[in-house]
Image (cartoon, helix red, strand yellow):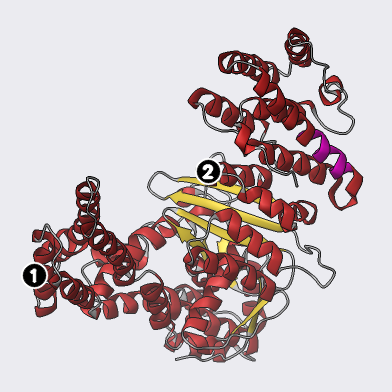
Amino acid sequence: MILTKEIIPIAADEWTIAQGLVGYYRILKHAGIKVKLTDEGLLFDPEHLNNFEHYYFQFFLERYSVAKRDERVIRREFFKFKQASELDSKQAKGKIKAAKKGLDDRIKLTALDKVEKKFAETVATNRLVEVAKIIRNQKTYVVEMVEWIEEYIAALGELEINHKLTLNYFKAKVLGPYFGQVSILNVLNNSKTLKEQQAIFRKDYIDPLLADLELQKVMAQATSEQEILQYLESSVHEKVKGLKKQFKEMTIDQIQEYVSTNINHCSFFETQWAFDQYSESHFSPLSMSAPKALNFYWGANSALTTPISKLAKLILFCAPAGASIVGDKSLFVQLEGRFEQLIHANDIYEIGRNKDKAFDEILFDLVTEQRTKAQQVAQSYLILEYSSDYNAKKTDLQYLHLTPGLGKLFDSTIHQQWFQRLNYRLRSQLVRSFLLYQDPKALIHSYLRMKLKEDYAANEIIYACLLRHYFLLFTKKGEKIMATDLEIGRKRIWSAFYAGLEMKKKLEEGKARSIAYRLLNAVRANDKKMFLDTTMRMYMSLQEPLPSVIMNVLDESKIDFPSVADSFIAGLISKEEEKKNEK
């Protein structure tokens, strides 16, 4: 029963609460319930708790549906298997075997290792296991397999199977890293039905919150001590016994004085009373092992306490719904702005992830979507990427910061084309270096050395050099950067690359590679004299004039030494056919 219907404004101040509020909003939106937003956060309506345990589970059951996940994998692998079976070549046998193995492994993992071994035997489970074995036993493609695959997918989608598989998955892989084995996550509850686990969730998170809200309202509105004591007689609040004993001989004024001086207020929501102390079970990624932490502690084993309200506990328990989770990593986008913009920014990332977009591609979408009418990136984004191991009491947290100045690097069409010229791995590492505000000089150097060692083409490195140079300018000058600064650097980088490419034509392959190694060592040691001496000897041996871009390599007033040097080396180990028009 809900005594109070008062709306409570909640602000998304800390990123943990912001993530929890986004999750709370998403859960209710998924249930078709509209939540009123404010510029700072949202309005918490106790009425929304009437059936919240159902909304909570349904959100995660749909988002992490094992049946939907497996269907995508099975259809993909079966398509490969069928396609390979139609080939008439020596490679067909290997492709058929690989595709069939991918199909069989997925079916075995779900239908045989989990359903057959761990589920109670029913008509639905028998049907799934039977079809699974038929598919796995068929080693070559036959047309009947199309029907078998459809039958397997339909059987896997049965609620009694899919719900149990998904429930076990999201509790262990999604909620577990955040909260350990608290409440529904205790392994003793794994055998319980969905309804039983929903009841546990309500008992642990919703009913105590309602009791807190009732108590706080009564204490605020009571006009006599008798009114308070009468309420406590029928209250189910966990602290009722102690409060009754404490208030028994007090007047209304004494009770109010006691409340104001002895009852803690929540560290997250000041208006809410707090009868609990923050611990790792409330949000383990924020906890640290004592005595290293000065704020929150594992096991609450410090004299320093952090009071937390039941409302904050519920909001934090919604945090996994507010993040984008891939594997064991969670990602949340924090920004300074209206709460609606915060929700939208995180929705952009989630939509991109669902479309299997790479991190940098989603970042470009985020920057583009959040432009102001002046066509500039208005907000400063803090992208939090973290993974937490509850049992090891360890959290790996990275802060990726996108300022308005750095946003210009990702907001340009030309720059995006440069990013696309890079292979996926290099592009991803480069983007992360930028967001961590780390100079990717060593990263570019390692790729140059790898390409030289493996005799790979190095044309893409020129774009990494361009992006690195622009990154250094944007982070140094921000929005005050001049177009002439960018143009000078761009021209020198391309000039150095083409100089190296032209020199490559005039040297024997072995000689070019030997010189490239020496130049790489010079750049790595930041030995400008050795770099200049090596290039001068090379040009003199061929009776060629030293290009002005090399002669001026010591002048770093407009562009740094590694940008020019790495570009020259990239040209020196590139293929002639790679030469393209510069942009």
Q: Quadrant of the N terminus?
A: bottom left
Question: How far apart are the alpha carbons under marks 1 and 2?
Answer: 42 Å
Direction from residue 230 to residue 563 in the image, left or right: right
Vertical placement of residue 299 versus 194, above or below: above
**Which of pointers 1 and 2 indicates the residue nearer the eye?**
2
Residue range in magenta is 485-493
Quarter occupied by residue 580: top right
Query: Looking at the picture, how far across and down is residue 66, in whole percent?
Result: 30, 68
Quarter occupied by residue 58: bottom left
Quarter occupied by residue 37: bottom right
Residue 524 visible in rendering? no
Query: Looking at the picture, how far across and down is residue 304, in whole percent?
Result: 58, 50
Do callouts 1 and 2 mark residues in contact (Cβ within 8 Å)?
A: no
Q: How many marks?
A: 2
Tell me the tag on residue 348: none
Query: Looking at the picture, how far across and down is residue 143, in whole percent?
Result: 15, 71
Magenta stretch encompasses residue 488: yes
Direction from residue 583 to residue 487 in the image, left or right: right
Measuring 66% from the left and 25% from the top, which residue is drawn there? 572
Q: Earlier in the sequence, mark 1 or mark 2?
A: 1
Q: Magenta: predominant secondary structure element?
A: helix
Q: Secondary structure at mark 1?
A: helix
Query: Mark 1: which amino acid?
Result: Glu
Residue 504 visible in rendering? yes
Q: Which of the pair 33/523 is nearer the observer?
A: 523
Q: Which of the pair 183/425 is nearer the observer?
A: 425
Measuring 88% from the left and 34% from the top, which residue is drawn there? 558
Neighbor class of circle 1 (other Cα within 10 Å; few <14, some 14-19, many 20+) is some
Q: Secondary structure at mark 2?
A: helix
Read off the residue under disc 2: 425
Neighbor class of circle 2 (other Cα within 10 Å; few <14, some 14-19, many 20+) is few
Read off the residue under disc 1: 130
